[in-house]
Image (tube, helix red, strand yellow):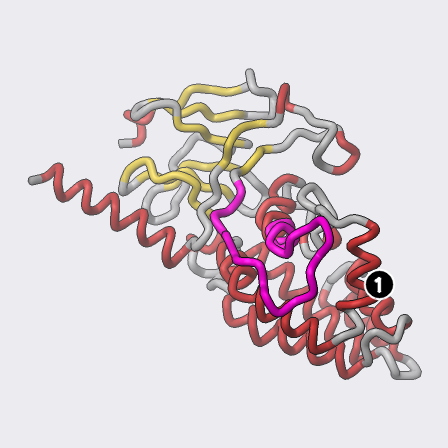
């Protein structure tokens, strides 16, 4: 009877994480070969933790122009993976072009695709709205899967865009914008500002269009911001060892052992905690595959 109750509790715990707290459960698959890779990360010299692609399988939209030699689903997955993983791969360094515009490790954009977007999609508000309506559900799931720190950075980017557009046509607009950045202790984000300026300079968007998209994003995503006071908002669970012991990562990609109240129970942070058996974990202290220590699960029960 006790065994049956334990199994039920375990299943309910997993369901709670997958359906309510974390719609997308991160699944680490291992460290980059020999700790390093020339294919990923800034400069091609940094190590990283690889993750399994999210289980999102959106059907190709039927009301959009055909993409030559590339599917909409692949472009969508590129953006989702960038939001989920880029920040962690860079140990908490948020690179707007990588994380938001999917121009980093998981980007599949080519010059041909960017030219196609500039000619066809970006100047056409009706077409843009169709694309947005198609990607919105998956992006909301992704945003709701992030830690509060990652969510808040994106929310701050939206506020920056809003303030920039508000100051754009004022005679002292740049000074007002710069003072606002200092007051908010925000750094100038050239990628975000540059994106808006290119839309305006190329006559693809008007200021009214900019305001529309900023307000649309705010209404669709800001209600999903997590509660900073809820400690679970600061972690993403990657494995449930038992009903009272989880492996979780924070926004910087630091891995910890937590109890069911999301209090730290492990001796230190790791770049990855891997389950080896029912009684043994490996805590990797660096991206070197040989640099780990054994964690006996009996010590945490």
> Where are the magenta residues, as a range?
53-79
The answer to whether 156 appears left or right of 273 in the picture is right
Of residues 127 and 171, the one drawn nearer to the viewer in this rendering: 127
Q: Residue visible at 44% across and 30% down?
A: 267
From what the image shows, is residue 70 above or below residue 39?
A: below
From what the image shows, is residue 247 above or below residue 183?
A: above
Number of numbered discs overlaid on the protein picture: 1
- Of helix, strand and loop, which one carries label 1? helix
Query: Quadrant location of the N terminus?
Result: top left
Query: Quadrant location of the C terminus?
Result: top left
- Determine if residue 235 is in view: no
Dividing the picture into quadrants, the one containing residue 158 is: bottom right
Q: Residue visible at 34% across and 40% down?
A: 240
Residue 73 percent coordinates (x, y) = 60, 54
From what the image shows, is residue 218 above or below residue 189?
A: below
The answer to whether 22 appears left or right of 174 in the picture is left
Residue 108 percent coordinates (x, y) = 71, 46
Q: Residue furthest left?
A: 1
Q: Residue furthest right?
A: 171
Residue 151 percent coordinates (x, y) = 57, 59
- Determine if residue 249 is in view: yes
User: In the image, is residue 31 part of the stretch drawn in magenta?
Assistant: no
Q: Residue furthest top?
A: 290
Of residues 291 and 104, the one drawn nearer to the viewer in this rendering: 104
From what the image shows, is residue 50 above or below residue 219?
A: above
Quickly name the residue at label 1.
194
Q: Residue visible at 75% across and 53% down?
A: 97
User: In the image, is residue 69 part of the stretch drawn in magenta?
Assistant: yes
**Prevalent SS, magenta region:** loop
């Amino acid at each position: 009877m006790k065994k049956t109750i334990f199994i039920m509790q375990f299943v309910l715990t997993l369901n709670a994480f997958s359906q309510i707290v974390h719609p997308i459960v991160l699944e680490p698959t291992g460290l980059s070969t020999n700790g390093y890779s020339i294919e990923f990360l800034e400069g091609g010299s940094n190590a990283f933790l690889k993750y399994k692609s999210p289980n999102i399988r959106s059907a190709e939209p039927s009301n959009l122009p055909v993409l030559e030699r590339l599917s909409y689903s692949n472009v969508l997955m590129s953006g989702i993976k960038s939001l989920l993983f880029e920040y962690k791969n860079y140990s908490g360094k948020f690179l707007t072009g990588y994380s938001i515009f999917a121009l980093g490790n998981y980007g599949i954009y080519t010059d041909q695709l960017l030219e196609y977007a500039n000619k066809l999609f970006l100047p056409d508000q009706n077409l843009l709205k169709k694309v947005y309506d198609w990607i919105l559900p998956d992006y909301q799931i992704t945003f709701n899967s992030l830690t509060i720190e990652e969510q808040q950075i994106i929310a701050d980017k939206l506020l920056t865009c809003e303030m920039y557009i508000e100051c754009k046509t004022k005679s002292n607009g740049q000074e007002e914008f710069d003072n606002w950045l200092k007051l908010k202790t925000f750094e100038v984000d050239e990628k975000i500002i540059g994106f808006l300026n290119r839309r305006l300079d190329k006559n693809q968007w008007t200021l009214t269009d900019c305001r529309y998209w900023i307000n649309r994003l705010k209404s669709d995503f800001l209600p999903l911001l997590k509660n900073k006071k809820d400690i679970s908002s600061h972690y993403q669970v990657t494995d449930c060892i038992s009903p009272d012991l989880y492996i979780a990562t924070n926004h910087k990609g630091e891995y910890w052992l937590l109890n069911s109240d999301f209090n730290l129970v492990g001796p230190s942070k790791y770049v990855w905690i891997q389950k080896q058996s029912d009684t043994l974990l490996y805590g990797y202290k660096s991206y070197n595959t040989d640099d780990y220590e054994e964690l006996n699960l009996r010590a945490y029960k």
